[in-house]
Structures are given as structure tokens and as C-alpha cells.
Image (spheres, grey):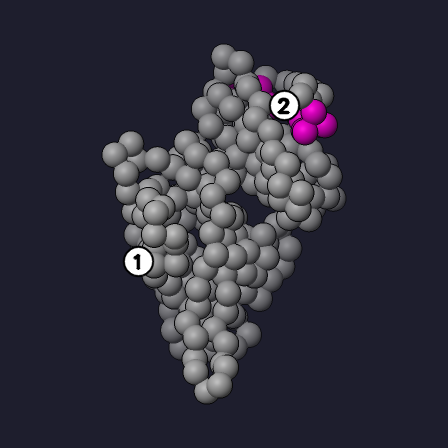
């Protein structure tokens, strides 16, 4: 029996693949430990930031720590990381994890493919999301919302005005995103890839919105 223990300082949220029950556990720590465990067998894989950096193109700034993670599938993740640069940039990556294969009696190690999506992502655990079956990706900067249809690579940036975004969530089936901001407002965004998307503002809270969630049914 193996037990992974994390301190409260290091532990980041565990994702369960968009609210669905899963037999695979993914654990991420700020210090760079990514543990991928199949709870039905003894198979597990633990990867450090250094392992991931070796998989990145040589001309990219290297990661110094993970900040957030969303699991799209067992081997595809949205990951937010701080890169080791002078301005401490926070980047959003689409990560495809390739499992080890046995080929001609040679064992190949797990490796990662990275796709940089956007930058200056807010440093909190509710700053990125995916929806529409894993096709729609969203991320927030302080005053900008980034959306992408990953299947077509179409993307748009939308401004919040004078309010600062605090959290973002995507509809599980449709191309819809909800955002919260520091004024306590919740906004539902439709027609995301139009120049002027349709927005519906809901009631204000007295404090900034901390988190949002659609139900599995999309309500």
C-alpha cells in the first residue's frame, strides 16, 4: 500500500474529470509533484516539474511551480504554471500526457506535449475552465476573458470593463461561460466567438464572487 501525503501548504485541488465519478486520481502540488494514480490497480506515475521541463521546447521559459490544474480526460489537462522569468509570468497550457509504451523491448518514459494558450492568468484556483465536452476552454486575467474552441483553434478576448474577474466556469455541454467579478456580479456569456457576445448579468453579491459551478445537467 502506498499513501501520498500532502501538507495544506502544498496541496492543490484534486480534479475528478468535470464532476463525473472516476477511478483515476490526479494530485498536483505547488512544489512540482504530479501524481497520477489508477485506484483499481497498482499502476501509478509521479512526475516532477523538472521532468515536465525536459519535455518542453528548449526556447520556452521553464516552469518554477504549478498553480492550478483541470483534468479534461485521463491524459489531457489544463495546467496553470508560473514560469521562471524576470516578470514571473503565469501561463495556461494544454497538456497531453503520453503513457509509457513497450516497443521492441524498450521501455519509453512518460512524456508530455505542451500547447501554450494564454498568459498573465490570474493566480487562483478558479482562473481556468473547460466545457462543451472538453472543446471550450476559458481563462481570466484581471480584466480580460480568454475563450478558445480547441477543436477549431478559434479564440477571442473579451473585456470586463472596470471590474476585475475573480472566477470562471464553463457549461458542461454548451458554448457558454459564466464569470464572477470583484463587484459581486455574475455574468453569463453566450455567442462567445462573436465580436460582441451576448451577456446576461445576474444579482450582485455584497462581496467578490469566490467560485461558480454549473450542475452536471448544465443549470
**Residue 138 position (above or below residue 72):** above
Which residue does the image show at 61% across and 34% down from the upper left? 155
First of labels 2, 1 by sequence position: 1
Reply yes or no: does residue 97 show up in magenta.
no
Element assignment for label 2: strand
- Tell which of 205 and 146 is nearer to you: 146
Q: Quadrant of the C terminus?
A: top right
Name the magenta segment's main secondary structure: loop
Distance of label 2 from label 1 (alpha carbons): 39 Å
Reply yes or no: does residue 187 show up in magenta.
yes
- Tell which of 130 and 117 is nearer to you: 117
Q: Report the span colored magenta.
A: 182-194
Q: Residue 32 placed where, x, y %?
A: 33, 54
- Tell which of 109 and 141 is nearer to you: 109
Residue count near mark 1 (Cα–Cα under 10 Å), binned few <14, some 14–19, many ≥20: some
Residue farthest along the front direction in this orientation: 59
Q: Is residue 198 left or right of residue 119?
A: right
Foreground tag (2 vs 1): 1
Instruction: Name which quarter of the figure residue 111 lies in.
Output: bottom left
Q: Are marks 2 and 1 in contact (CB under 8 Å)?
A: no
**Residue 176 position (above or below residue 198):** below
Is residue 11 in view from this perspective?
A: no
Which residue does the image show at 61% across and 50% down from the upper left? 18
Q: Name the residue carrying label 1.
A: 50
Q: Residue 40 placed where, x, y %?
A: 55, 74
Amino acid at each position: 500500500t502506498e499513501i501520498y501525503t500532502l501538507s495544506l501548504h502544498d496541496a492543490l485541488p484534486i480534479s475528478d474529470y468535470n464532476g463525473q465519478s472516476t477511478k483515476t486520481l490526479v494530485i498536483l502540488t505547488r512544489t512540482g509533484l504530479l501524481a497520477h494514480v489508477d485506484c483499481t490497480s497498482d499502476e501509478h506515475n509521479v512526475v516532477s516539474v523538472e521532468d515536465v521541463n525536459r519535455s518542453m521546447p528548449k526556447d520556452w521559459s521553464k516552469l518554477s511551480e504549478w498553480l492550478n490544474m483541470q483534468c479534461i480526460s485521463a491524459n489531457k489537462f489544463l495546467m496553470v504554471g508560473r514560469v521562471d522569468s524576470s516578470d514571473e509570468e503565469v501561463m495556461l497550457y494544454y497538456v497531453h500526457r503520453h503513457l509509457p509504451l513497450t516497443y521492441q523491448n524498450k521501455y519509453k518514459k512518460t512524456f508530455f506535449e505542451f500547447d501554450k494558450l494564454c498568459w498573465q492568468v490570474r493566480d487562483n484556483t478558479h482562473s481556468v475552465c473547460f466545457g462543451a465536452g472538453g472543446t471550450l476552454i476559458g481563462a481570466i486575467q484581471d480584466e480580460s476573458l480568454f475563450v478558445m474552441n480547441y477543436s477549431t483553434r478559434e479564440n477571442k478576448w473579451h473585456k470586463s470593463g472596470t471590474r476585475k474577474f475573480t472566477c470562471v466556469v464553463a457549461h458542461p455541454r454548451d458554448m457558454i461561460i459564466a464569470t464572477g467579478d470583484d463587484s459581486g456580479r455574475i455574468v453569463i456569456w453566450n455567442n462567445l466567438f462573436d465580436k460582441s457576445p451576448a451577456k446576461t448579468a445576474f444579482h450582485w453579491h455584497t462581496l467578490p464572487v469566490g467560485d461558480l459551478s454549473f450542475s452536471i445537467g448544465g443549470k
